[in-house]
Amino acid sequence: MNKYGFYTTVLVIVVLFGVVLGLLFGIPKYNVWRTKIAIEAAQNMGKAEMARAEQNRMIQIEEAKANLESQKLNSLAEIERAKGMAKAIEIENGKLTTKYIQYLWVRNIDKMDGDKIYIATEASLPILEARDDNAIK
């Protein structure tokens, strides 16, 4: 073997020895670094989940506040409606005549469910329900 072959062999052995030593010390350090990165990623994911949960909680609180405000306004509207009805009764001297009750019923027909047909009868009372029992069979 010549002089260059010997130096080349020694150089290859030294490089291989250096690579092995580097791996012996580098792999554990790499594993520690990789674990730290994984922990940080998990913590960031946890922070994102916490932020999302906080946002959802705030949305629910705002929806509850809006619902409360709606209920308050509905109750105020109901109070005003009752005041109006009391005033209307007062104007009529506390008397509700059958004609006025019929007028209110006809006026509110469109607010009732189902199909309605108003038929004036001899007694001036509306027919509230009519059914043909023979048609059911």
Image (cartoon, helix red, strand yellow):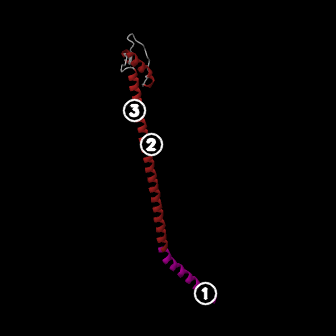
Q: Residue at x 44, y 53 (%)?
A: 54
Percent from the top left, x then y, of residue 3?
63, 89
Q: Residue 7 — which label?
A: 1
Answer whether residue 2 is visible to the viewer in this image.
no
Residue type indicated by callout 1: Tyr
Residue type indicated by callout 2: Ala
Label 3 or label 1, whichever comes before in sequence order:
1
Q: Is residue 103 above or below residue 76?
A: above
Looking at the rendering, in which quadrant would you find the C terminus? top left
Start and end of the magenta stretch? 1-28
Percent from the top left, x then y, of residue 78?
40, 32
Between marks 3 and 2 in the image, the one whose residue lies nearer the viewer = 3
Q: In whole angstroms, how far apart are the C-alphas of marks 3 and 2?
A: 20 Å
* Mark 3, secondary structure of its residue: helix
Q: Main secondary structure of the magenta part?
A: helix
Q: Which residue is mark 3?
A: 79
Percent from the top left, x then y, of residue 18?
54, 81
Q: Residue at x 40, y 35 (%)?
A: 75
Q: Residue at x 40, y 25 (%)?
A: 87
Q: Which residue is mark 2?
A: 66
* Mark 2, secondary structure of its residue: helix
Callout 2 crowding tier (Cα within 10 Å): few <14, some 14–19, many ≥20: few
Answer whether residue 46 is visible to the viewer in this image.
yes
In this rendering, position of residue 4 left or right of residue 23: right
Task: Tell me, yes or no, whether the highlighted magenta stretch contains residue 89.
Answer: no
Name the residue at the top extreme: 122
Q: Are marks 3 and 2 in contact (CB under 8 Å)?
A: no
